[in-house]
Image (cartoon, helix red, strand yellow):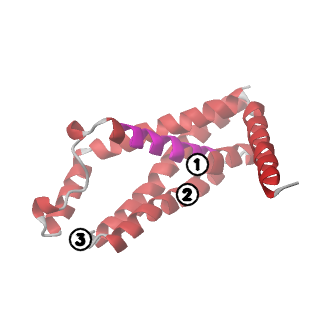
């Protein structure tokens, strides 16, 4: 067997195994995965539209002394298709991560606290992955924003997984 044939056989085997796992997902798992994506998107969007959150980001910009030279995001009215696709992709990925790493393990353990702990750690790590490299590589990135982003990420994932898991456990207990 050549190296190419081995790689092809391995990748076909991996694709088959992944497809089998998807087929084995029951309705509850699919529902929880979709619920995690939707819940995260709603919670995140509501959070960013709250007046005190907008004011917080504006005060960070003002405190940086950069005025309009440094903006913490594009106004939504200027967004095009690529921004919406990127946002949708983010919500899908973070929702699936919450589902796979927090919600499903909690369902297997019948433990809401497992979902809460796992999702908070996931959110901290996910947002640190973005915020810390931004701070290191962007000269004007405000230090407080690093900590704010990381904590917010933890709580957004915590809220998502807690809500979805609590509802799923209650539905399962009902029967």
**Residue 85 counted in the magenta span:** yes
Measuring 75% from the left and 31% from the top, which residue is drawn there?
23
| Disc 2 packing (10 Å; few <14; some 14–19; many ≥20) | many
Q: Secondary structure under badge 3?
A: loop
Closer to the observer: label 2 or label 3?
Answer: 3
Measuring 88% from the left and 54% from the top, which residue is drawn there?
1
The numbered mark at residue 122 is 2
Contact flag, marks 2 and 1 (Cβ < 8 Å): yes
The numbered mark at residue 140 is 3
Q: Secondary structure under badge 2?
A: helix
The magenta stretch is 84-99
| Position in image of residue 107 (x %, y %) | 70, 43
Q: Report which quarter residue 135 is drawn in.
A: bottom left
In space, the residues marked 2 and 1 are separated at their CA atoms by: 8 Å
| Position in image of residue 29 (x %, y %) | 68, 34
In space, the residues marked 2 and 3 are separated at their CA atoms by: 27 Å
């Amino acid at each position: 067997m050549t190296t190419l044939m081995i790689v092809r056989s391995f990748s076909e085997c991996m694709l088959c195994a992944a497809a089998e796992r998807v087929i084995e997902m029951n309705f509850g798992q699919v529902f929880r995965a979709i619920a995690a994506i939707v819940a995260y998107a709603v919670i995140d969007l509501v959070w960013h539209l709250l007046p005190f959150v907008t004011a917080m980001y504006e005060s960070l910009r003002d405190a940086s002394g950069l005025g309009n030279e440094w903006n913490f995001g594009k106004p939504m009215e200027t967004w095009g298709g690529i921004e919406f696709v990127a946002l949708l992709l983010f919500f899908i990925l973070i929702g699936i991560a919450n589902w796979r790493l927090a919600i499903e393990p909690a369902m297997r353990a019948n433990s809401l606290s497992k979902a809460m702990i796992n999702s908070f750690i996931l959110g901290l790590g996910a947002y640190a992955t973005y915020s810390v490299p931004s701070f290191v590589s962007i000269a004007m990135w405000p230090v407080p924003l690093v900590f704010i982003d990381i904590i917010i990420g933890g709580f957004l994932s915590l809220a998502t997984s807690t809500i979805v898991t609590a509802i799923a456990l209650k539905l399962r207990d009902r029967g």
